[in-house]
Amino acid sequence: MNRKEFRDLASPAEAREAIDSLALEGGIERVSLEEARGRVLVARLDAELDVPGFDRATLDGYALRARDTFGADEADPARLELIGEVHAGEEPDVALEDGQAVEISTGAVMPDGADAMVPVERTDRVEPRSTERASSAERSSANSRAAPPRDDGDAASADSAGDEVLVRTSVAPGDNVMFAGADVAAGERALGPGTTITPRDIGLLSALGIDEVPVRAKPRVGIVSTGDELVRPGEDLHSERGEIYDVNSYTIAAGVEDAGGEAVLYPHAGDEQDEMEEILRTAADECDLVLSSGSTSASAVDVIYRVIEEQGELLLHGVSVKPGKPMLIGRLDSSAYVGLPGYPVSAMMVFRTFVAPAIREAAGLSEPASATVTGRLARQERYEEGRHRLMPVGLVTNGDGETLVYPVDKGSGATTSLADADGVVEVGPETDYLEEGEPVTATLFSPDVRPPTLFGVGEDDPTFSRLLDGLENPRYLSVGSRPGLRRLREGVPDVAVAAGPLEYEIDATELGGWEREWGLVVRPGNPDEIEGLADLVDRDLRFVNRTTDSGLRSSLGAAVADLAEERSVDRHDVVDAIDGFDLGLRAHESPARKVIADDADAGLGLRETADRLDLGFVPVGDQPVRVLANPDRTEKEGVRELEDALEEQ
């Protein structure tokens, strides 16, 4: 198979232009109100009826003729005859004449003859005069306060007839009445095309009696992850075969839905061209856009570009951007196609920068208000590849509340780079160096992004993990003791967690600490009868170490040096005699899990880890763990909360 070479890379602008040339629109569909939120109308909707469709009372009280109350006040109320009641949902069976009133509930239909209403709080209900019927012009003071109108659906109009009401205020025609069509009048424009339907709009449509609406169909986006090594989450994983869980299918699908599209996941495609072509053609037949991840780089086994080139139309292959150089754009049958890189960080950065805007436009959604933050770069950054760079960054505030921006880059293959980042800084190809303290603008992944209340780095430790659980919105990067101290010295994080002896002095404030027991994690019951480090040297045992960045590795190194001195041999001879000493794993549980998998007889670890995983443990020593704070940030609220938590543990 011939190798595909990247020759002339397209610019980011040319990549956007190629994607814009693709037709992604999904057409028009009608959806029910239950499914309408967030969808985009494609036609104007006019009101077919008045809202409300009748004159209605806006308060509990009494419907009346406004002229019967002219001149009424607290000292000289108007006396009106009650002739009935009207409740919400009932058709009035009374009509008012001069000097009469009707008890009425909020939302009820105003009876004929009434042109206003008075709230119950400004009235008194009284027994009628026994000498003669009071005229509407007669004024007298009430001796007793009236009961509020009854809201009982079973009460008949006759219950109010015969009583009288004293009205202690004057009202004008239309007071406390919403007339028919006052909200929306028949024939009036209700919502226009291009409206993104909100809960408020659904309320309006409901009031108009509209139960379904014409909207722009969501673009159907087929997602195909390629590679023989991929396994769906939830299925059994065989790491010995190099299998990995499929990250891209689910992260890209979530991004598609967030951009307004409908994501459709297809089976994994292997690296054989016939299999890949079959899955891609199926997706192209059923979707407006097909997104694949992987098999786009210039390697001998990456064949997807051949499928598009031979069976469709290849518009672009290779973009001068990092991450994301091996992007592919084209058409396959009647569908648009974009090939994303296989590494998760590269795939999501390219999707977010180039593809998501096109999906939003096809769905009729406007670009979200792009929240940006300007801050100072926390440390210098070098870059010499001459490509447009999409740099994931995190945010942290210093002791003065100023925003600092720091790069978050574990490589394109790391799945946590974006999870640990708050946004992205775009760096032009002409820039090869960013100075510490230089102002930069970060585009946030979401307008809701806020800097963490506490930003820590350092040793992976279960006790500290429990402390973080009690804090609000902390962020912690388990980079190891040595890198953690180095970053603290550079002034980026608020705190660093260091285990073992400190190799050099550092300007920091110690907030607290604890001791942890370390040693060798072995199989349950210690069937190999391992007693200590000497057994690793003298016997044929498989050992798994931690990385050199780990504080545990430092303590182990000191113990090995002591053993070498005790035996009067060179330290390197002891190290060379331990099978697996140079195999270092990053996390504190990783060596123990190698023991569980029977890939090792012993692993460097903590007693707490062995107890939690029901493994055996051979103690070697105790190790101090310190939490060190940047001296300029000890007054930050998150740092103070951590200090309080350390004192309480």
Image (spheres, rainbow, N blue to C red):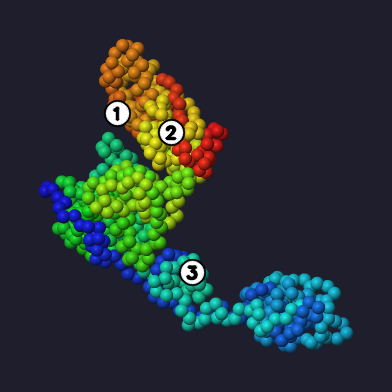
| Location of mark 3 (residue) | 202
Q: Is residue 123 above or below residue 35?
A: below
Which residue lies at the image location 45% right of the left edge and 34% below the top edge? 508
Residue 305: quadrant of the picture: bottom left
Q: Which residue is mark 1?
A: 583
Q: Secondary structure at mark 3?
A: helix
Cα gap from disc 2 to disc 3, whole angstroms: 59 Å
CA gap between label 1 and label 3 equals 61 Å
In this rendering, position of residue 460 left or right of residue 637: left
* Residue 293 at least partly seen: no
Q: Nearer the viewer, residue 605 or 369?
A: 369
Does 110 sit above or below residue 21?
Answer: below
Q: Is residue 38 left or right of residue 384?
A: right
Q: Amino acid at mark 1?
A: Leu
| In this view, the mark in front (1 or 3) | 1
- The percent position of residue 644, horizontal first and vertical second, equals 55, 37
Label number found at residue 507: 2
Question: Is the C-beta separation of discs 1 and 3 under 8 Å?
Answer: no
Q: Position of residue 466 (x, y in %)?
A: 49, 36
Depicted 317 relative to depicted 116: above or below: above
- What is the crowding at mark 2: few (fewer than 14 residues within 10 Å), some, or many (at least 20)? few
Marks 2 and 3, the one that precedes in the sequence:
3
